[in-house]
Image: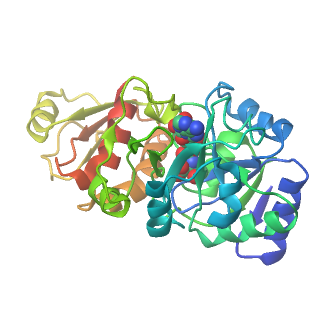
Amino acid sequence: MRLDGSDAAAVERAAELLAAGELVAFPTETVYGLGARADDDAAVAKIFRAKGRPADHPLIVHGADPASLLRFAAEVPPVARRLIDACWPGPLTLILPRTEGLAAAAAGGQRSIGLRCPSHPVARALLAAAQRRGVPGVAAPSANRYGRVSPTLAAHVVDEFGASLAVLDGGACVVGIESSIVDCSRGHPVLLRPGLLTRSQIEAAAGEPLREADARAPRAPGTLASHYAPNATLRLMPTRILAEALQLLGPQPLALAVYSRAALPRAAAGVRYRRMPAKPEQVAHELFAVLRELDAQGVQLIWVEEPPAGPEWDGVRDRLVRAAAR
Ligand code: TXA
Ligand code: MG
């Protein structure tokens, strides 16, 4: 069921469904989320069933404002406080020690909890309407089946779960890749997943350096080697290798797509060329939609030019490396 995110009555309807323990997919500035009230373990169980996600993989709890959301945290270290002040609402998730007895299913049994205040106006309206109905927070992973490409359009969510799921349509997600995740539950802040915000932007806001995730870092499916994969096999290559490989192709038509910043010489018939935009935020914005489009066109192989080395490309590079690791 599609609900129009710009229609206040539709937002109220979606909030009612959440309050009643039903699932609602909704837009955020990063990707669409599949939401259920975080304080209802039975409602949260529906998310894990729908996604086919293992029950011990924790979800992010979303809230309209920091004050309401921080109920889920047993403790807010000063570094987390600084990150909240600088980055919320926005595409940053914080892992904090969890308030005992709250949102155990959403936390996947962890003693910590992922919290995020999204900036998307439709998400904010929905979360505020749900809060007025007594919903303290909405647990929501990306609205895709386990291991698959995250949705950045309401139509992608329908492709994943069918038309019976309530989907609040807020148009195309501006950021396009998932939030940055910083673990503030274990002393020093650790970057678990890069996103749009660069490491140096987060460090400037945190007032201290971020550590790399180590072996003791909590489990996060978004940090598994293979994730975010399209149906087609994706390969990441330096520009020169990509150009050479194209030259080596025979004349037979191939279900091959090339996604590159460089303008490459046209090779065998049937190869689809997609130009990668120049700026990392433009690539992030379109990346998942491009992968889904190529899948829908029946492409079997996607050759992607490696993005440049700069830290502003970390989020995009991270998603491409994982998509290629299959
Ligand atoms: O941008 C986003 O973050 C989107 C939108 C919908 O907000 N959500 C999203 O959720 O990407 P999901 O479930 O696909 O990815 C959430 C990541 C997972 O890798 C999960 O393991 C990690 O957050 N996570 C959540 N709670 C955690 C915790 N307590 N400790 C460690 N990792 C946690
Ligand atoms: Mg996900």
Describe residue 104's horizontal placement relative to residue 94 as left or right.
right
Front in this rendered view, residue 36 or 274 = 36
Q: Which quadrant would the C terminus be assigned to in this image?
A: top left
Residue farthest along the right direction in this orientation:
20
**Residue 189 or 266: which is nearer the viewer?**
189
Pick the residue in front: 242 or 99. 99
Where's residue 90, x and y in %?
50, 64
Which quarter of the picture shows residue 244? top left
The reply to whether residue 244 is visible in this rendering is: yes
91, 293: nearer the viewer: 91
Residue found 44% across the figure and 68% down from its top: 86
Residue drawn at (74%, 43%) of the image: 162
**In this image, 248 relative to 225: left or right?**
left
Q: What residue is rendered at 40% in x and 29% in y?
A: 300
Q: Residue 270 appears in which quarter of the rendering?
A: top left
Residue 280 screen position, x and y as percent: 29, 58
